[in-house]
Amino acid sequence: MMHGDEKSDPAIGAVKPANGAAPAAEERVEQRAGAKGNASGQSTRRTQSRESVSKALERVRTKARERKAEKFTALLHHIDVELLRDSFYAIQRKASPGVDGVTWKDYAADLEANLTDLWDRIHRGAYRALPSRRVYIPKADGRQRPLAVAALEDKIVQRAAATVLEAIYEEDFLGFSYGFRPGRGPHDALDALAVAIETRKVNYILDADIQAFFDRVSHEWLIRFLEHRIADKRMLRLILKWLKVGVLEDGVVVPGELGTGQGSVISPLLANVYLHYALDLWAEQWRRREATGDMIIVRYADDVVVGFEHEADARRFRDDMERRLAEFALTLHPEKTRLIEFGRFAAERRARRGLGKPETFNFLGLRHICGRSRRGKFQLRRHTRRDRMGAKLQAVKVELMRRRHQPIPVQGRWLGQVVRGFFGYHAVPTNEGALSAFRYHVMDLWRRALRRRSQKDRLTWSRIARLALDFLPKPLIRHPWPSTRFAATHPRWEPYALIGHVRICAGGVR
């Protein structure tokens, strides 16, 4: 939700422009607060040269904010040794190595010489990207998610390039875009969605998921989108190297024809750029020109939730969205995309028609439910998805069996970390039952693992309960109510504001 006047930004159409053609007509989009910088970067001692880097990027950020049609012709020079050093320290030290086998510690052994040589190769045009190493991680539904593990130097350069590009695009991205952005996280998106559903005229929810998005991104369209703001050919060639280098799988290098290499450092930013032009600008324009009633939008990466006042708007938007995405080689997932009746009056309307309770939808690991408060008012309830909890418990079970011969205090400390991590994300209001259930099942798995130590072991539940008191945190709601945190994050936001010139919508306040 946001306040403030709206800005303009170039609209993107699917029809390829002629060579040398001017940018498409401008369209008005939502304003946002200024970027807060690279939130993921590791804090290090600030030197004078690093101050210069920050000031230079701040000038880029200011220029991007004030001149929405400006193209940046000189960006690569911002990637200097200082920025490369910061990017190196931002990389996880225990991250898996790429095809070169170089680890964080290996590179740190002669860091300054390595970074100086890397900087020299970048600016001489001698830098060559290496193929990413393909790995697979299990998903909650039992399938495998392919990830691309880049070489260490590629991670460093990608992180540095992303820092430079973020200074530009964080001023362009719309307020309802939340995924993989500095200063924004999944709970910010969840709060915006919850507040919008509870305070706006939302009667229908379109839960949309773009099928295999990271694998189907068109390189041609991505470069053309980047060229709307980036005129530095060296920076564009650098990005093309990462897109085209391909992945190593089963000893064979598969060239990169489509996709952004899910798991790479720069992939989230490129994905946001792609969806900004392919979807976000169009959706905001559709909301302003086509919607006959209220409409909200929240997007986190390729997961999109759109709320509507009128069913006719919802159906037209879905059809138009499918056609829009098809123009950019994207499709909606047929099984994960649903239009449901949802909102404050959904239960009453369905009861009058002799139907059951309103359907639910999933977003960012939580199931959203139409519920009632103790006072009988509408309340958006959010519960942990059962499949996500089941997958987590299965992983705990496997690891416990591997650790079952460790000392009990060692097991307890590890389980405590697991439970605290689960609570850290899922401890939202109205989700107390899932927290208690998760802790109970962890205790039961721990008991079963300890009893496997010996056939004579008769470990009782009361003893496990005593051990749980020592090691496992108790269920406790750790996140505030969405409206409370949203109001604190955006102090200018007021629920049910009736100011004529004020624009309230899901996705942040300006």
Image (spheres, grey):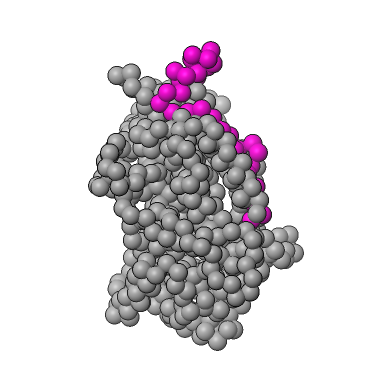
x, y percentage for residue 241?
62, 72
x, y percentage for residue 225?
56, 65
The answer, for residue 500, to whether it is visible in the render is: yes
- Of 440 and 170, nearer the camera is 170
- Of 111 and 409, nearer the camera is 111
Q: Is residue 394 a member of the stretch shown in magenta?
A: no
- Of 8 and 34, nearer the camera is 8
Q: Is residue 209 above or below residue 441?
A: below
- Of 360 and 350, nearer the camera is 350
- The image quarter in which residue 173 lies: bottom left
x, y percentage for residue 480?
30, 37
Which span of residues is magenta-colored?
A: 328-357
Q: Is residue 353 above or below residue 365?
A: above
> Would you say the magenta stretch is mainly helix, strand or loop?
loop
Q: Is residue 342 a member of the stretch shown in magenta?
A: yes
Q: Is residue 54 left or right of residue 174?
A: left
Callout count:
0
Q: Is residue 492 left or right of residue 157?
A: left
The answer, for residue 394, to whether it is visible in the render is: no
Residue at point 44%, 36% (across, down): 293
x, y percentage for residue 5?
33, 54
Q: Looking at the figure, which quarter contains the N terminus?
A: top left
- The image quarter in which residue 407 lies: top left
Q: Is residue 228 above or below residue 410?
A: below
Residue at point 33%, 57% (across, down): 33
Residue at point 61%, 71% (across, down): 240
Residue at point 44%, 72% (across, down): 70
